[in-house]
Amino acid sequence: MAVTLLDKNYNTNYCEFSYDNWDLDKDSIPTLNSAGKGNLSTIHSCCQGSVAIGTDGTIKILTGNNEWIDY
């Protein structure tokens, strides 16, 4: 399990994350209204359109429904 913040725009709240295994890491990544966990606990939220990039090349995007989905 490894997830990290790659970039955060503090003006727009847009975030980019990197993860190894979505099934293990998804609960650590913040959403529109929940803070991250573990090493991401200082990230209190991120905006719709934020992305999470897997080390296997997959990409997830945060929707307005507060869900991380395949991009």
Image (cartoon, grey):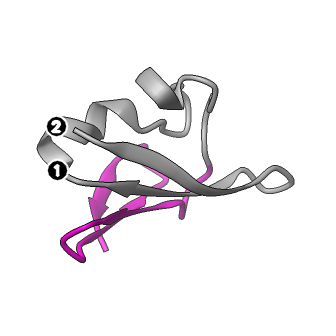
Q: How many marks?
A: 2
In the picture, the quarter occupied by the N terminus is top left
Q: Secondary structure at mark 1?
A: loop
**Residue at (16%, 37%) from the top-left corner?**
24
What percent of the width, then of the height, locates residue 23? 13, 43
* Residue drawn at point x = 51 percent, y = 31 percent: 40
Is 39 placed above or below 52 here? Answer: above
Q: CA distance from mark 2 to mark 1?
A: 5 Å
Q: What amino acid type should be assigned to the residue bearing mark 2?
A: Leu
Magenta-colored stretch includes residue 17: no
The image quadrant where one finds the C terminus is bottom left
Q: Secondary structure at mark 2?
A: helix
Q: Which mark is residue 56?
A: none
Q: Could you tell me residue 46's position as x and y percent? A: 60, 45
**Residue pointed to by mark 1:** 21
Q: Residue at x 62, y 32 (%)?
A: 43
**Magenta range:** 47-71
Q: Which mark is residue 24?
A: 2
Would you identify the image quadrant in which residue 69 lies? bottom left
Residue 42 visible in the current orientation? yes
